[in-house]
Amino acid sequence: MGWPLFCAPVLMAESWRLKAYAGMSYQTELRKGLLLGASAAVLWAVARRYGRGAERRMLDWDWATRVAVRTSGTVPALHPAARERLQEEYRAMLRRIEQPIADYTGTTLALSGTVIQVMDRHDWIRANVANFRELFEPVEQFYAESARTELVDLPGVAQAGKAVLSAQVGLLLGFLAQRVLGQYDLSLLGQEPLSAGRLYFVEPNIQSLEHQLQVPAAELRTWIALHEATHAHEFEVNPWVRTYMNATLQGYLRSVVDDMRDRSPGRGASSMLARLCQNLSRGHTLLEAMMTPHQRQLLSRLQALMSLAEGYSNHVMHNVGQELLSHYAEIQARVEQRQRQRGRGEQLLLKLTGLSLKMEQYALGETFVGRVVAERGIGFLNRAWVAAENLPTEAEIRQPERWIQRIDLHVA
């Protein structure tokens, strides 16, 4: 589904929060960017192309897009005829798996009307940059307001800092663009009524995986479609889930902006340091330590929902796939082996970007779903999708019996 992308605005907001608490110190901004791995050559080249009167925005999305495209690797472009043929194949595939998913989950969704887009890596990057821009707009607006009140800054340093953060976003997107197979893209922060989600299939990556695994092409694509189509069930059979995610995400970003606005430059660094020390002493991670209790609560809700959604989709994919695909066990075993063989560089990048943590949370979500279904059945698990108060907390994701007990009491 591309769930890691929902974490990016949070990470970017925290990156900007550090800068704001430091009293808008552009020297600190530049130094931190360099430590995060941006090259001096990139900084110099990009700083030259900005003037002192340049638009005051935190990110240059055009630059982030170009960085992402350049780092996503070189693959042949999809021919329009091939793209249309593949889209028709995926439409037929959704029609075939619609009833098996409904039979297993007990929920019904007509997948024939789902918008399908077969993409290359560049298409996928541009689609997700558009989502990022809309999602991150509240923090961008605050940055613009703050920048207009700043005194004279060193020529080129603020622009270079913007280039660093934009390049970081671009590098993350470029990295993901090489690996994403499919994505359920739901409409967030849009105007009501919200449009239905879209299913993306990144064909160059799917073809690459097909060649690596040496498994039947149609079965591999069905395996991917089962996972993404289940996400459609989660959000479109239960439209309140998208509204809940939307409200929680907006609430988090508003809280970050309000928190930064309430802190004067003179006391920002000291108060931030005090918060960090206090929260780290309580066992919070570095990212959590930068947050207020309210922000941690909102982020925890999002993480719990993402764990449930991924765990549910994997569970349905496994159980329905075993019945539909003769090579299912082979596909699953080879994918898991490939994941275990990640190089050190990729493992380091996953850790630095927080994606490894997201994968661990998704694994916990799958364990949660498996335990609940084993003990009470899929019908009982589906109560999680009835209302927001039925969603598991992060603690309950780790201890499924707590959620089962709570739901039993709620029903009683």
Image (spheres, helix red, strand yellow):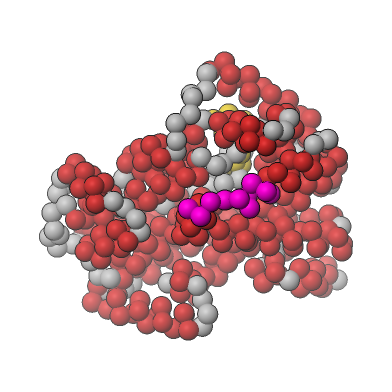
Residue 379 vertical position relative to residue 395 in the rendered view, above or below = above
Majority secondary structure of magenta residues: helix
Residue 181, magenta (yes or no): no
Residue 292 vertical position relative to residue 209 in the rendered view, above or below = below
Coordinates of residue 165 in the picture (x, y in percent):
33, 53
Residue drawn 83% across the image and 58% down it:
373
Coordinates of residue 204 in the picture (x, y in percent):
55, 31
Residue drawn 52% across the image and 70% down it:
296
Residue drawn 66% across the image and 68% down it:
393
Q: Is residue 293 visible?
A: yes
Residue 240 vertical position relative to residue 321 in the rendered view, above or below = below
Coordinates of residue 198 in the picture (x, y in percent):
60, 36
- The segment highlighted magenta reads 336-345
Quadrant in which residue 412 is drawn: bottom right
- In screen coordinates, is 372 left or right of 171? right
Coordinates of residue 77 in the picture (x, y in percent):
48, 24
Residue drawn 79% across the image and 55% down it:
382
- In screen coordinates, is 45 left or right of 355? left
Residue 338, magenta (yes or no): yes
